[in-house]
Image (tube, rainbow, N blue to C red):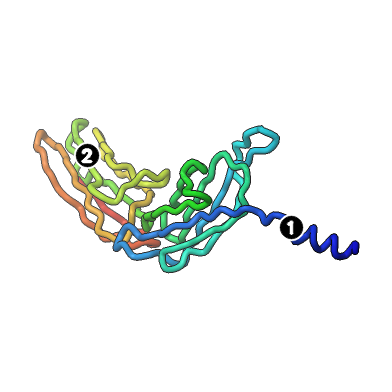
Amino acid sequence: MLILTLLFSYSCKKEAEKVTISGNVYNTIGGEGVSSATAYLYGQKVSSSSWNTTYTLLGSSAISGGSFSIEIEKENISSYKLEIVKTNFFKREKVFTSDNFSGNTYKNTYYIDPSAEVTIVVKNTSYFDENDYLKYTMENGFADYDESCGEINEYTGQTETDTIHCFVIGDQEIVISTLSVKNNVTAHDEVREYCAAGENTEILIQY
């Protein structure tokens, strides 16, 4: 009788409620579905009615053929954060809450940018006077990442030789337009270099 009671009690236990976080991931250059990447799901857990500002890893999933799915037990989570990580790509983050769920599921579409390292070398090859001026503008490839190249840089005065190491959105031709002034003569030019993801490309700007 005791064994039957225990079995009955066990069978009547409520199965833990689940939530599913899934999505599709595409390469911004080319638009193909991403593989050989990983999605990490973090959450800020609420315990004893207190808010925790620290994100704890809740689960992860390999991304294959442009899709992933993470199933976890439903908990009291104030905020979720999803990170998509792939070698030679900029990391993509998305923060959301259970208010964004449809039932117990959350699905979204993500685009990730391939990253390419560049070494920008700026040289004033024929200094005239302190009024020498250069302004270069990245027409594409820059993005809102901490390690990204700045969109605009300016130089004034004496001979400049400057070297900048930074990252651009790779697997494309990067276009940099320049405006220089020497001896009251204004010149416009353009530099083009193909920057492959995962590689370091030198870009020379002379004025």
Query: Between residues 170 and 105, which one lies in front from this camera angle?
Result: 105
Q: Amino acid at mark 2?
A: Lys
Dot 1: element: loop
Left or right of 44 on screen, residue 28:
left
Which of the numbered marks, if any, corresponds to residue 80?
none
User: Going by the picture, which residue comes out furthest to the right?
Assistant: 2
Q: Secondary structure at mark 2?
A: strand
Identify the residue position indicated by label 2 in the image. Answer: 135
Tell me if mark 1 has few (under 14), some (14-19) or many (20+) residues whose alpha carbon lies within 10 angstroms of its own: few
Q: How far across and how far down the image is residue 194, in percent?
A: 26, 61
Front in this rendered view, residue 139 or 55: 55
Q: Earlier in the sequence, mark 1 or mark 2?
A: 1
Task: Write the residue at 40% across / 62% down.
Answer: 198
Observer-side mark, 1 or 2, equals 1
Name the spot of residue 64 as percent of width and height, x first: 46, 67
Query: Relative to the observer, which residue lies in front, 117 or 96?
Result: 96
Residue 68 percent location from the top left of the image: 48, 62
Give how far apart the Cα atoms at labels 1 and 2 are: 73 Å
Q: Residue at x 52, y 46 (%)?
A: 81
What residue do we see at 32% from left, 57% from top? 28
Quarter of the picture holding the N terminus: bottom right
Number of on-image labels: 2
Q: Quadrant of the C terminus?
A: top left
Give the image quarter of residue 70. Answer: bottom right
Residue drawn 55% across the image and 52% down it: 41
Horizontally, residue 168 falls left or right of residue 97, namely: left
Is residue 173 toward the left or the right of residue 18 in the image? Answer: left
- Which residue is label 1 attached to? 12
User: Of the residues shown, which amino acid type is indicated by label 1?
Assistant: Cys
